[in-house]
Amino acid sequence: MLELHQVHKTYATPQGPLRVLDNVSLRLAAGQSLALMGESGSGKSTLLHLAAGLDLPDQGIITLEGQNVASLPEPTRAKLRREQLGLVFQQFHLVPSLTVIDNLRLQARLAKRDDAEWSDYLIERLGLKGLEKRYPEQLSGGQQQRLAIGRALAPRPPLLLADEPTGNLDETTAGEVLELLLSLVHETQCALLIVTHSPQVAAPLDRCLRLSHGHLLEAPL
Ligand code: ADP
Ligand code: MG
C-alpha cells in the first residue's frame, strides 16, 4: 500500500539546512491503521506530504500502491493521489463556492468514481442530511470537518492520510469527529495514517510510531 524506504528530507532555511527526516522507513499494509506522534516541528506533516507525493524526498524511495512516487511526472502523481488517497487536514480545505453535496462529490467525480448511492449514504452517516444545499461557511466547524472526511472517502480510496484532523475543533466535537472518521475507515476497510497528539486516538489503532530528531521509533500503545 504505502512504503517509505530510507527516506531523508532536509529543508534549506536561513539558519542553514534543517534535517527533518533522517533515514525513515515505514510500511503500511492494506487496511492497516497507524498513528504518527511526535513533538510539534518533528516532521509529521513533512512525512505525510511525502507520502502523498505533494513533495519529494532528498533520498530514499516512496512507493504508493507499488508505484515509485518520485519516478512519476506530476500529472501522473496527481492522478495517483486522486484515485488512491484521501487527505484530511487540520484546516478543512473545502471549496467555498460549492455546496455541501458538490464538495462531497467533487473528488469522486475527479477520480471518475462518483456513486450517487454511496454519497447519499455518506451524507447521512456524516449527519449532513438536509444540509446538502448549504455552503461550507453555513456549517459549524465540526460539520465542515465531517464533510471534509466524507469528501476524502467519497472516491473510496484504499488509503486515508489525516494530519491532526481534529486540531481545530473543541474537545467534544473533536471526539465525535474522530469516532466518525475511525468508524468510516473501518467500514470502508481503508488503510489509515493519522497524525495525532492524543494517546486515546492511537490506542485502538494497529500501530503507533513517534518521530523524534528525524528518527521514526515504534511507540508503545
Ligand atoms: P510537524 O508537522 O511535526 O509539526 P513539520 O513537518 O511541519 O512538523 O515541520 C518540521 C520542521 O521543518 C519544522 O521545524 C518546520 O519549521 C520545518 N519546515 C517545514 N516545512 C518547511 C519548508 N517548506 N521550508 C523550511 N522549513 C520547513
Ligand atoms: Mg504538522
Image (cartoon, helix red, strand yellow):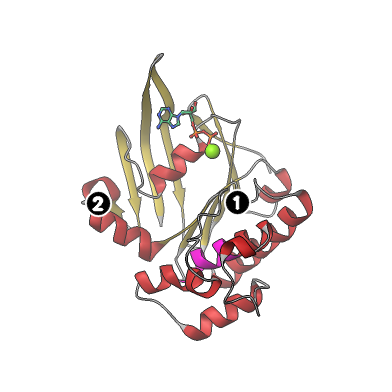
Q: Residue at x 61, y 59 (%)?
A: 145
The quadrant of the rendering that contains the C terminus is top right
What is the quadrant of residue 142 in the picture? Answer: bottom right
User: Is 82 positioned to the left or the right of 132 in the image?
Assistant: left
- Of 202 and 73, nearer the camera is 73
- Of 53 and 91, nearer the camera is 91
Picture coordinates of residue 99, whole percent (x, y): 52, 71
Q: Secondary structure at mark 1?
A: loop
Picture coordinates of residue 40, whole percent (x, y): 59, 31
Going by the picture, which residue comes out furthest to the right?
A: 172
Let me know if residue 150 is in the magenta part. yes
Highlighted range, magenta: 147-154
User: Is 173 positioned to the left or the right of 59 in the image?
Assistant: right
- Please give the residue where the numbered disc 2 appears in the rendered image: 74
Q: Residues within 10 Å of mark 2 (few under 14, many from 20)?
A: few
Name the dominant secondary structure of the magenta segment: helix
Picture coordinates of residue 193, whole percent (x, y): 53, 51
Q: Secondary structure at mark 2?
A: helix
Q: Residue at x 45, y 65 (%)?
A: 158
In the picture, the disc for residue 107 is none
Q: CA distance from mark 2 to mark 1?
A: 26 Å
Q: Earlier in the sequence, mark 2 or mark 1?
A: 2
Let me know if residue 50 is in the magenta part. no
Going by the picture, which residue comes out furthest to the bottom?
A: 117
Residue type (three-letter) at the residue carrying disc 1: Pro
Answer whether labels 2 and 1 touch (C-beta < 8 Å). Answer: no
Residue type (three-letter) at the residue carrying disc 2: Glu
Picture coordinates of residue 37, whole percent (x, y): 60, 39
184, above or below 171, in the image: below
The quadrant of the rendering that contains the N terminus is bottom left
- Please give the residue where the numbered disc 1 appears in the rendered image: 165
- Of 160 and 25, nearer the camera is 160
